[in-house]
Amino acid sequence: MVERKKKPLFIRKDGNKQVKLGRGRRKDKKKWVWPRGRHNKFREKRKGHRKNPSIGYSQAREIRGTIGGLRPVLVNNIRELERVDKQKELAVFASVGMRNKIEMARKAQELGIKTNLNLRKFLKKVGKRAEWETKSAKATKPVEEGKKDNKDKENKEKSEEKKK
């Protein structure tokens, strides 16, 4: 298998100086913008300045677009999950509801398929949430039967007495 080449982080001119241009920002916010200045040393590729992106930094065709050597595949349901080749593909769960996501996570763990989620952590978190919901449901007091009806009758009687 071909290994990934290291490449520099391409951030725009003065990205290391200003927060809005890249310093201390999330990785996806550090957007590359080609320098266009007339006397810009960065654009002129002068020594001592950052590298500009070029075709030579691209990855090998076999691993381009892969995550850890696995090709990501969007999965919408359990049937599609069962078709995933666990040696070559990585299951990426689509935006499905929580119930389906839990079922798909359990099935993926059972089949040994790698996913975009940390399955053990996700299922543990869901289990804790379910326990918490059951505890909170038990903690709320159930309304006694007839209690509300009695209050309504008392209120009606009081209003009738006031009318008299």
Image (cartoon, rainbow, N blue to C red):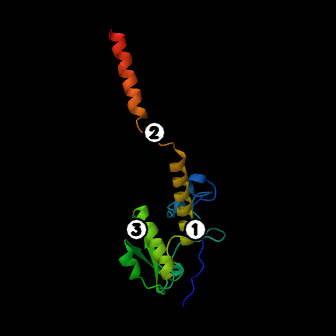
Q: Residue at x 45, y 39 (%)?
A: 144
Which mark, by number, is residue 121? Answer: 1
Mark 1 lies on a secondary structure that is helix
Q: What amino acid is found at the position of numbered circle 1 in the picture? A: Lys
Name the residue at 36% across, 11% down.
162
Q: Is residue 107 visible?
A: yes
Count residues near mark 1 (Cα–Cα under 10 Å), then give few for <14, some for 14-19, many for 20+: few
In the rendered view, would you say 139 is above or below 156? below
Residue type, numbered disc 3? Ala
**Label number found at residue 42:** none
Residue 60 or 145: which is nearer the viewer? 145
Identify the mark nearer the N-term, 1 or 2.
1
The amino acid type of the residue labelled 2 equals Glu
The numbered mark, 3 or 2, whose residue comes first in the sequence reads 3
Q: Which residue is mark 2?
A: 144
Q: Which residue is mark 3?
A: 94
Q: Element type at marker 2?
A: loop
Q: Position of residue 160 (x, y in %)?
A: 33, 15
Query: Which residue is depicted at the point 41% across and 33% down?
Result: 148
Tell me if residue 114 can be seen.
Answer: no
Give the residue at x 53% y 71%: 119
